[in-house]
Amino acid sequence: MAGVLPPNPNDPRVIRTRQLILDAFVRQLNIMDFNSITVGDITKAATINRTTFYAHFPDKYALFEAFLLDAFTKMVLQKIDMEAPLAEKTLQELIVALCNYHKTSQYCFKKYDSVALLLEENMKLHLEKLILQLISAAASAADSKSLATAATLLSWSLYGVTYRWNLEGRTEPPSELAERIMPLITSGFPMFNPQLSCSE
């Protein structure tokens, strides 16, 4: 409705209602295919009306993006030191966090295939932004186009390796995977930080 202000995101009531919607959505994902879920299913499970839902989210796709961002924040962003330089330790922490993210995501949905593409696109987008932030801080002298390209290369590489690890049955602990692939990463991206060079 024109002239109506969106909910204040800092209002405790708004935060509770938003969480209520997210929780109801997760419950629906556990019993239904994402493509079959309707806004009506979500509002019924959350015991709210459609007007309340649309005050928070324009549609179920925006809700799904919010859910994925929340999961990414809890399972990836909060597991690494955002203030640390882009060193080997930070990348290893990131690989372990991504492995855990993939593993958990697979069990969040009744039919994983129905959301796999959306999940992948969303994950790559957030991961690319995160890595660009980390490498920009570590290589402030580099031009922005080169940094953006490097962020794309690195984020898609990390996503692909951890996705394959999950797909192939998680045959090694995430920490061992991180250690095994670090020489490949650091030899390809030595310009961000001297600490990224493999120790001799």
Image: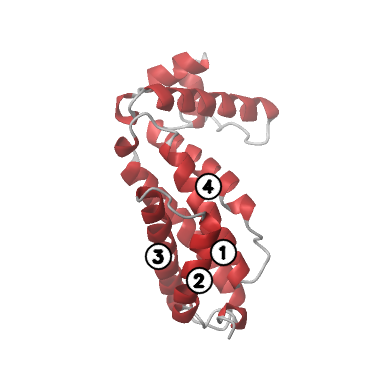
Residue 95 percent across, percent down from the top left:
51, 59
Instruction: In this rendered view, identify the residue nearer to me: 165 or 133.
Output: 165
The residue depicted at 46 percent of the width and 30 percent of the height is: 2
Instruction: In this rendered view, identify the residue nearer to me: 89 or 56.
Output: 89
Q: Quadrant of the N terminus?
A: top left
- Contact? badges 2 and 1 (CB < 8 Å): yes
Colouring scheme applied when the structure was drawn: secondary structure
Q: Which mark is residue 182?
A: 2
Residue carrying label 4: 72
Q: Quadrant of the C terminus?
A: bottom right
The residue depicted at 39 percent of the width and 53 percent of the height is: 163
The quarter of the displayed image where residue 42 is located: top left
Residue 159 percent across, percent down from the top left:
42, 58
Marks 2 and 3 sit apart, C-alpha to C-alpha, by: 12 Å
- Contact? badges 2 and 3 (CB < 8 Å): no
Kind of residue sitting beneath label 3: Ser
The residue depicted at 56 percent of the width and 64 percent of the height is: 92
Within-10-Å neighbours for mark 4: few <14, some 14–19, many 20+? many
Q: Please indicate whether residue 65 sits to the left or right of residue 94 in the image.
A: left
Residue carrying label 1: 92
Marks 1 and 4 sit apart, C-alpha to C-alpha, by: 17 Å
Residue carrying label 3: 157
Of the two numbered discs 1 and 4 on the same chain, state the one appearing first in sequence. Answer: 4
SS type, badge 2: helix
Marks 2 and 1 sit apart, C-alpha to C-alpha, by: 8 Å
Of the two numbered discs 2 and 1 on the same chain, state the one appearing first in sequence. Answer: 1
Q: Is residue 14 above or below residue 200?
A: above
SS type, badge 1: helix
